[in-house]
Amino acid sequence: MSDITQSNAPGQHYPPGEHPDLPPPPGTVGAIGWLRNNLFSSIPNTILTLLAIYFLVVSIPPVLDWVYFEADFEGASRTDCTSAGACWALIDVRLKQYLFGLYPSDELWRVYVAGLVLALAVLPVLFDKIPFRKILLVNTLLLPITGFYLLSGTGSGPDAWLTTVETPQWGGLLLTLVIGVTGIVASLPIGVALALGRRSNMPVVRAMCVTFIEFVRGVPLITILFMSSVMVPLFLPEGVNFDKLLRCLIGVSLFSAAYMAEVIRGGLQAIPKGQYEAASAMGLSFWKMMYLIILPQALRIVIPGIVNTFIGLFKDTSLVLIIGLFDLLGIAKTVITDANWIGLSHESYAFVAVIYWVFCFGMSRYSIWLEAKLHTGHKR
Amino acid sequence: MATQSIDGPKRGSLLSDQRTRAIVFQALAFFLVAVFFIYIGTNTARNLEALGISTGFGFLDSPAGYDVAMSLIPYTATDTHGRVFFVGLLNTLSVAVTGIIAATILGVILGVLRLSKNWLVSKLVYWYVEVVRNVPLLLQILFWYGVLLGLPRVRDAIPVFETMFLSNRGFYLPRPVPGDGIGLIIIAFFVAVIAIPIIARAARKRQEQTGQIFPVFWTSAALIIGLPALAAIVTGFPLTFDYPEKGGFNFKGGMVLRPEFVALWFSLSIYTAGFIAEIVRAGIQAVSHGQTEAAFSLGLKPNWTMRMIVLPQALRVIVPPLTSQYLNLTKNSSLAIAIGYPDLVSTFGGTSLNQTGQAIEIIMMTMLVYLTISLLISMLMNYYNKRIALVER
Amino acid sequence: MSDAVQRVSTPGVSDEVAIQIIGMHKWYGQFHVLKDINLTVRRGERIVVCGPSGSGKSTMIRCINRLEEHQQGQIIVDDIELTGNLKNIDAIRREVGMCFQHFNLFPHLTVLENCTLAPIWVRKVPKAQAEEIAMEFLNKVRIPEQAAKYPGQLSGGQQQRVAIARSLCMSPRIMLFDEPTSALDPEMIAEVLEVMVNLAETGMTMICVTHEMGFARKVADRVIFMDGGEIIEQNEPEEFFNNPQSERTQQFLSQILAH
C-alpha cells in the first residue's frame, strides 16, 4: 500500500487495485459538510433553516424565562410570587395532592409500597433479561390482589390490619395510574377474546363481537363514561350500587378493549394460513393452537399497535374528571380554583402535562426499542 | 379400558362433534346475552317507575328553558329539547369540520417538513409531534382555554391591525357585510368552479391529440381568484366590513369567536395535526425509493414524479388512517363539555339530561349520532379501499 | 498491463464517444466507494461490468444518470457534462434509459400506462402515438397481450421485460442495466437475457452490470472487472475470460464459473 500521507490531489494515479482510501474532499463531510448538506444545501433549504432559527430565537428565551429564570419557587400563596415568570410555589405546596389526591397522610406509606410493587411487577414484563424474573413474574400475577388490598385496605375499625380508604379519597397521579394500569391489564385479554370472536366461524359469536367492537369504536369515550355514571345505576336492582371508580374502570377497560381487539385482529390476519394448517396437522386443539402458535406470533407483530393503544388509554384516563373523579388532571383543574392560587392555570397544567408526557413518551420509546430488538432477532 | 365399540369407526360423543359443539356454544352465548339484557331491562323499568320518570321521546317537544351560548340556527330558551339537539349537533359539526380542515392543512405541511432534508426543520417537527401526541387532548384544551381566559378584559382588549381585538371574552373580528352586486362575485366564483373541469377536460383532449401540455393547475388558480376579483372591480367592491368598536363594557358590531370555540378548535386542530403529520410522513415513505428512481431515470421531473408516481401510491396508504383521524377528531370534539362549548354532548347530553332525567333516551340518541357518522364514513372508506386496491396476482 | 485497453472495433461500434468518465471519485460519508474511475464508452458499444458485491459497480452506473452524485472528476454523456445543473440532468436522463434489479414498475398504472407515461409527459407525444410506440416495444419484448394488466399480475420475468420496454419507449441512446436478472428465478432469466441480446443486435449502447457470463461472451464488446471501488481490469470477452491479468480477476472468475 502506498503512503496515505501522500498527496491526495485529483489526478494522482495508482496501479489498478492499489488505490488507497482517501479522505473525502474538504467541505463535504465533517462539521462544515454536515451544515452544508443538512441546513444550507439549496436556497429554499437555507430559507427554511433561517426561519426555523428565527422561530427558536423568538420562542425559546421567553419560555425559559417563564419556566426558570424569572420564576418563583417558594411561597404560601400566589401573592408571594412577585416575579414575572411562573409561580411554582403552587406545585411545591400542593405536590401531595397532585400525586395522591386526598389519600390520608398517615396511610401514604401504603401507596409507596404499592408503587414499589407496581414497579417490580412491570420490570419483568418489559425486559426479559433481568435477574429473578420468575419470582418477579409471580409478583406481577398477584398485582391486582396486592394492589387492591394495599390501596383500599382490609377493613375499618381500630383492629383492622389496613384501614379502609374509600375510593373518593384516591386522586392525582395515583388515581391516573390505577385507572391506566387496570385498563391496560384488563383490555388485553378482553381484546384478544373479542378479536378471536370476530374471526370465529360461529356466526352468532361473530355478530356479537362485531356489534360490540363497532359500537364502542363509533362513540366518544365520554358518552361511555356518562353511560357508566348515569345509566348503570338504573340497570341495577334497587339498593345495589357499586363504586363509581369501579364503574368507570369497567367503562374504560371495555372501551380500550374494543380498540385493542382491532389491533390484535390485524395481527391475526397477518399470520399466514400455513401456520394454522401446520398447527392443526400437528393435532393441536383450537385453544392450544392459539396459545402456542398463533397468538405469540400475532401479538408480536402488533406490539407497536398495542403500545399505541396503551398510550391512548393512558391519555384517555384524563376524561374521568368530567364525571367527577379527581385524577391527575382533575386535581390540576381543582387546585387552581383555590382562592390562594386562582389564575395559575398555566403552571398547574404545564406541570401535569410534563408528567403525562414522560409516561407516554416513555411508552412510545419502549415500543420502538422493542420493535428494533424483535426485528433484529428475526433477521438473526 | 379397551372396550371401544367394535362395530364401525369411532364416532365420539355428541359433545365432541365439532358442529354440535359450535351450535351449543353459540346458543349458550346468545342465551347469556339475552338474559343479561332482560335482567337490566326489568331493573331499569322498575327503577324508572320508582323515580317517576316516564320513558319515551315526549320530552323532545317540551321547552328546554335554558340558553345556549352559541347557535347557528335561531334559538331561545323557550324552544324545545328537540331544537337543542339540532343546535348542539350543528355546533359539533361546525367545530369538527373547521377542525378537520385546519388539522389537514397543518398536518400535511408538517408531514412534508418532517421529511425535509433540512435537519433543523425535521427535528423541530419531530418534537412538535412528540409533544402534542403524548399529552392528553383534554389537558391541551384546558390549557389553551386557560391561556385565552388569561387575555385582558374587554376594556383592555389587545388590538390587532386596529380592526381585530383579542380579549378574555373572545376574538372580535370584522364581520363581512355584503352590498349590492355581491351576487355577481358569487356568480363569478361559481363560473370559475364550473369552468375548471371543462378546461381540464379540453386540456386533456388536446394533450392526447397534440401532446401539448396545458398548465391546468395555474389556469385554475388564476380563474378561481381572478374571476371573482374582476367581478369585484366591475361592481366596485360591494363587500364592506362591519368593524367591532369598543363601547363601554362590550364591543359593538363585528363578530365574535368565543374563547370556548377557539380553544376547542385550536386544540383539536394542533393535536390531530400531530397524528396526521405522522400518517403523511409514513405514507410518503411507504412509496419505495425505487419508484422515484425509476421515474427520474425516465426523465420525469421531481414535481411530476411527486404528482404522478409518489402521491397516487402514498394516498392509498394515507387515506384510511386519515379518515379514522377525522372520526377521532369528531368524537374528541365531545370534550367540549369540559370548557362549556355548547356541542351536542354538553347541551343535549348534559344540560337537557340533567333537566329531564331521560338518561337512557338522551345518551342513546347522542351515541346514535356519533355511530351514524362513524358508520357512514367507514362505509365510504370500504368503498374507497375496494376501488383503489392494487391488482395483484 | 491491464491499463493497455485493446480496442477492437467490432461492427456497429463507431468512434463517436457516448460516455466519458474522467478521474471520478465518490464517497459515502467517509467511505471512499469509487476511486479514480476512467472509462470511455463509444456509441454502439456493449459493456458488461462485473465484480464482487460491494465493489461499486452499481454505484458507478447510477452516477451516469445522476441517481448518485459524484464528488470529484467528470462524467460527460453525449457531450453534456453532469453537474448540479438541473437542465443538464434532465437532458441526460431523457437520453439514458435504465433497468433496475427490482424492475420498479409503477404498480398503480397498467403495463401500457407504464410505457406511455414518460413519452406523454416528458417527450409530449400525443397519446395515440405513444400507445402505438408502446405496443411496438411490448411486441418486441413479446408481451403485447399483457398491456392492459397491472404489474402485480405479471411474473418477475414479464415485469422486467415491461421495464425494458418502458425505457425503450423514450427512445434512449444509451441503456443502463443494473443487475437486471439477479432478482429472477432461473427459468425467467433466459427470457430477459434474450430480450437484451435482441436489443444489443440493434446497435444500442449498453452498460450492463451482471454476473451472466454467457451473456457477456455473447454480446459484450468489453468486460470490465471492478473491485474495491476501482476498475481492476477491462478487456475483450475472449481475452478477459481466457487470460485474466490480475489475481483478483482470476479469483473472481473461478468463483463465479465454479457453479
Image (cartoon, coloured by chain):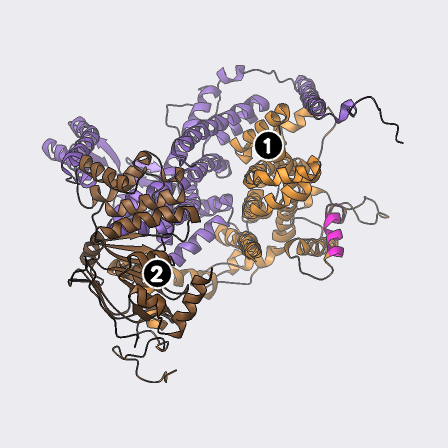
Chain colours: A orange, B purple, C brown
Magenta run includes residue B98: no
- Name the side, left or right, on which A218 lies relative to C243: right
Q: Chain of mark 1?
A: A
Q: Is residue B104 above or below residue A77?
A: above
Type of amino acid under label 2: Ser
Q: Which mark is residue A219?
A: none
Q: Residue B57: horizontal and vertical position, in percent? A: 54, 16
**How would you classify the magenta stretch by its main secondary structure?**
helix
Element under label 2? helix
Q: Is residue B190 visible?
A: yes
- Name the side, left or right, on which B387 lies relative to C16: right
- Residue at the far left in the pictured view: B234
Q: Residue C74: horizontal and vertical position, in percent? A: 22, 68
Q: Chain of mark 2?
A: C
Residue with the mark numbered 2: C58
Residue with the mark numbered 1: A199
The N terminus of chain B sits in image quarter: top right
Residue at 20 percent across and 48 percent down: it is: C171
Q: Which residues are magenta?
A: A134-146
Which one is in front, B234 or C254? C254
Q: Residue C119: horizontal and vertical position, in percent? A: 21, 43
Locate residue B234: give its quadrant: top left
